[in-house]
Image: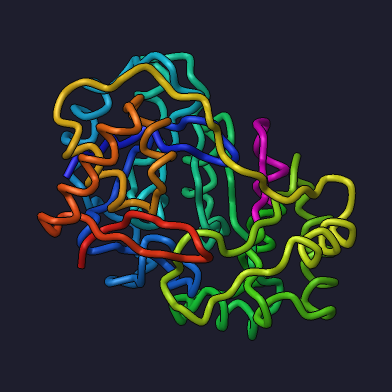
Amino acid sequence: MSIVFGPVPSRRLGYSLGIDLLPPDAKPCTVDCIYCQVGCTVVKTIKRGIPVPSAEVNRAIDAALPKAGIDAVSFSGSGEPTLHQDLGQFIDRVKARCRTAVAVITNATLIDRPDVRRDLAKADLVLPSLDAATQAVFEKINRPHPALRADKMIEGLVQFRKEFAGRIYLEIMFVKGVNDAPAELAALAKAAERINPDRIHLNTVARPPAESFAQPLTPDELARIVRIMGPKATSIGPGPTAAREPETGDIETKIVELVRRRAVTLPDLIGSLGLERASAGDLVDKLVRDKKIKKVVHGGVTYFREYY
């Protein structure tokens, strides 16, 4: 599988070229979130290491960049990117090759560690998650490694804000009946005020989740929480819709690599890879027949995701 994938249509970053520092088959992560669109975690760990050889990552970055028509280069994908101990070096390498903004999408579970904060501080934009402010709800929604604590994560985010000159967009993913009780909302609002991010992005389950019982909030429920969270908060809208210039090369492989990292719709693929609707439909139908991807209907919307 390719280390660099996409561009991915992102509701927060526009068209983002993804860099995956983790092996997709292992899906290593520090948590096992019930709403995760990548699926359940296979290897749950908090140990930083070199899950993908650094030389391979460097070669992939050099081959992919610079690239026209993208809004950001984001470190994300099959699991938690801060698990790779050379994350900071990879950010430096991307910045040496292009002027596109560099983002890291992180669950922030390791951000209490100074070495992790040093690596993240090299980025232009950090998008940490905070789905719970109490340990009980943290364990219910994120199913973390037993060593992880919600309070330590919050303290790490507070410290990172003091050290980081770039932008922080804090994301909170809401699951109905799990982290939307009044007491938890009050605790989240207090934590977010202490962290002081540039923006607070409120989200709910949209794509097929790891667990079918993870259900979304209604738009009205999410709008009510926006008011509770204050003026920096906004609910996340749809992603980019303008099509990019057509991609070249092995398009089937690019589709498979994209859906291994996230569930996507046909319009997502058309926009990301610059495909014609008819040809995109033919390609995904072939890949479904070949059992390389599969169709999943979620919330009345058809998505394509990894076949397993």
Out of 279 and 224, give the one closest to the viewer.
279
Q: From which residue to which does the magenta span run? A: 159-171
The colour style of the image is rainbow
Note whether 66 is above or below 203 in the view shown: above
Residue 189 sits in which quadrant? Answer: bottom right
Task: Report the side of 171 relative to 254 (left or right).
Answer: right
Query: Which residue is depicted at the point 48% across and 58% down?
Result: 301
Q: For the N terminus, which image quadrant?
A: top left
Residue 46 visible somewhere in the drawing: yes
Q: Position of residue 54 (x, y in %)?
A: 21, 39
Task: Report the side of 170 relative to 19 (left or right).
Answer: right
Instruction: Specify the farthest residue to the front.
Output: 278
Out of 300 and 134, give the one closest to the viewer.
300
Q: Position of residue 182 (x, y in %)?
A: 84, 78
Instruction: Specify the farthest residue to the left.
Output: 290
Note whether 50 is above or below 29 in the view shown: above
Q: For the C terminus, which image quadrant?
A: bottom left
Q: Is residue 160 magenta?
A: yes
Residue 89 visible somewhere in the drawing: no
Q: Position of residue 135 (x, y in %)?
A: 64, 81
Out of 19 and 263, give the one closest to the viewer.
263
Q: Position of residue 234 (x, y in %)?
A: 77, 48
Out of 131 and 258, give the one closest to the viewer.
258
Residue 252 sits in which quadrant? Answer: top left
Query: Which residue is depicted at the point 34% across and 15% down?
Result: 66
Residue 254 sits in which quadrant? Answer: top left
Note whether 264 is above or below 135 in the view shown: above
Query: Which residue is depicted at the point 36% across and 67% down?
Result: 39
Q: Is residue 182 magenta?
A: no
Task: Report the side of 59 relative to 20 (left or right).
Answer: left
